[in-house]
Image: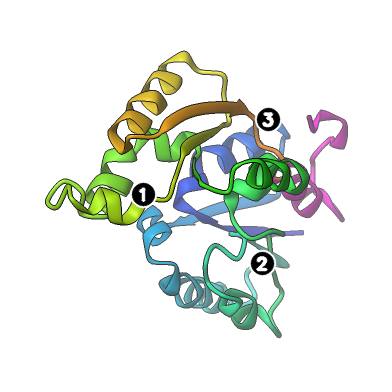
């Protein structure tokens, strides 16, 4: 079985690591769309649809490495009638943390701005420059005035990334908290999808 993963660029490192550590290299091809789409979710469905169309019948199955991600159901609509399936959930924060943990965190503090390892690494480009805070710092209050904390949902227990996360929170004027969640529901979803019916994954390797 030939599997294509059309991933969000913000997940590229994690998707490739999951493929490698579960022995899926011969079964799964990972291709990622630009991470800038994180700030323009309305463009995600069209970009995914275009890649599915180009795939034609080259692959037996296609996993779309996005949750709904702010598309308001439009991503699901473009997947109707195709062989493609997407990751469950509303966004990457939910499937990284898992739905129950994310719900608990959101309920405990609704005024939370979430970061992943990718967003910590690229905070200046994605958040500061992407939202125009470098040119118009007064927008900080418009965007983040109702937030209380930054919650770093960390994929790796990395002190360097923790320091970067703290600096990001300080730049936004918010408290910083970190929770190491690993790959959450992303890894088992990819392994199940890529390892079924002829895939090479050993499911016992999944954390």
Judging depth in this view, the residue of 162 and 195 nearest the camera is 162
Asked if the residues shown at circle 3 and circle 2 are in contact, with their CB atoms under 8 angstroms apart, the answer is no
Query: N-terminal of the two: label 3 or label 2?
Result: 3
The residue tagged 2 is 59
Q: Residue furthest left?
A: 135
Furthest-bottom residue in this view: 81
Write down the quadrant of residue 41 in the picture: bottom left
Q: Residue furthest top?
A: 159
The residue that mark 3 highlights is: 21
Magenta region includes residue 205: yes
Quadrant housing residue 162: top left
Tell me if I can see residue 25 in this picture: no
The mark that comes first in sequence, 1 or 2, is 2
Q: Position of residue 205 (x, y in %)?
A: 81, 29
Of the pair 104 and 190, the residue shown nearer to us: 104
**Quadrant of the rendering where the N terminus is positioned:** bottom right
Magenta residues, as a range? 186-207
Q: Nearer the viewer, residue 6 or 152?
A: 152
Kind of element beneath mark 3? helix
The reply to whether callout 3 and callout 1 are in contact (CB within 8 Å) is: no
At 87% from the left and 31% from the top, the residue drawn is 204
Describe residue 113's horizontal placement relative to residue 202 as left or right: left
């Amino acid at each position: 079985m030939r599997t294509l993963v059309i991933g969000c660029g913000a997940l590229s490192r994690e998707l490739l690591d999951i493929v490698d550590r579960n022995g899926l290299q011969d079964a799964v091809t990972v291709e990622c769309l630009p991470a800038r789409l994180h700030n323009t979710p309305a463009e995600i469905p069209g970009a995914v649809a275009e890649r599915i169309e180009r795939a034609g019948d080259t692959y037996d199955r296609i996993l779309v490495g996005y949750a709904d991600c702010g598309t308001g159901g439009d991503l699901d609509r473009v997947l109707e009638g195709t062989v493609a399936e997407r990751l469950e959930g509303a966004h990457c924060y939910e499937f990284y943390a898992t739905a129950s943990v994310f719900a608990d965190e959101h309920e405990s503090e609704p005024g939370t701005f979430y970061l992943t390892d990718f967003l910590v690494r690229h905070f200046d480009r994605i958040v500061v420059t992407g939202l125009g805070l470098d040119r118009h710092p007064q927008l900080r209050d418009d965007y983040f005035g109702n937030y209380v904390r930054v919650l770093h949902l960390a994929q790796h227990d990395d002190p360097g990334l923790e320091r970067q996360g703290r600096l990001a929170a300080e730049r936004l004027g918010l408290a910083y908290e970190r929770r190491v969640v690993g790959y959450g529901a992303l890894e088992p979803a990819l392994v199940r999808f890529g390892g079924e019916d002829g895939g090479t994954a050993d499911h016992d390797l999944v954390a």
